Image (cartoon, helix red, strand yellow):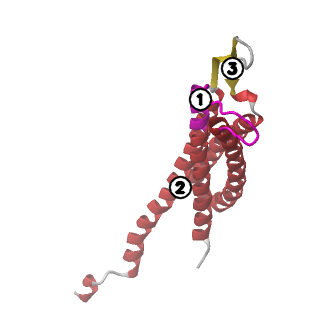
Amino acid sequence: MASTDKPDRESIKSEEAPAAHPRRSNYSSVHVALRFLLFAASVTAVVVMVTAKQTEIVPVPGLPISVPLEAKFSDSPAFLYFISALSVAGLYGILTTLAAISIVLKPAYATRFLLHFALLDVLMLGIVASATGAAGGVAYVGLKGNSHVRWGKVCNVYDKFCQHVGSSIAVALFASVLLVLLTMLSVFSIYRKIPK
């Protein structure tokens, strides 16, 4: 009777094994989901920025006439850099999403992929953050102006254009946060694989 009251070691191991497997797949599914969100956020930021265009009738200083002037994203090198960087981030997001799905299906090369993911995520974070900062700086000058160098604000005239630019920068900030989370998740996943 004493032998039936105490479970043997093999039955305990067989009960513990299924509990460890879903946890690993949860990390993998979170990894895939975050990478897909990175792709979606990058593409959204690019589309919103590319559609930032507005034409307004603006009075010419010193003359009694008004002319139509167009504001568009291609007028600023910072916005062009932003478009390029976020386009690369979108491509990176979809490629790494597919790679993360392949890791879920065949986990044999997971550690090597996670190391590459961590390194490339940090590189991509630097690119996305610098582009977001550059575009944010130009957008801030457009919103507030700079009285010291006599740059006037333009968002009081081109309100729709500025809303597009601001929304695109906000989505790019979300993409930067996703890259930080992906880097942390990759490093933590590698750390968990270190034998103790």
- Quick one: which residue is furthest to the bottom in this view? 2
Q: Position of residue 142 (x, y in %)?
A: 66, 35
- Which dot, 2 or 1, sits closer to the camera? 1
Q: Furthest-top residue in view?
A: 65
* Dots 3, 1 in contact, CB < 8 A: no
Q: Residue at x 74, y 14 (%)?
A: 63
N-term-proximal mark, 2 vs 1: 2
Viewer-nearest residue: 38 or 96: 38
Separation (CA) of disc 2 from disc 1:
47 Å
Tell me how far mark 2 sits from mark 3, CA to CA.
47 Å
N-terminal of the pair, mark 2 or mark 3, is: 2
User: Number of marks in the image?
Assistant: 3
Q: Quadrant of residue 143?
A: top right
Q: Which amino acid does label 3 sit on?
A: Glu
Residue 44: % across, % down? 58, 35
Dot 2 corresponds to which residue? 28
Q: Spatial distance from mark 3 to mark 1, Cα to Cα?
A: 14 Å
Identify which residue, 179 or 53, lies in the foreground.
53
Which residue has dot 1 on it?
Answer: 156
Q: Is mark 2 on a helix, strand or loop?
A: helix
Give the magenta range.
Answer: 145-168
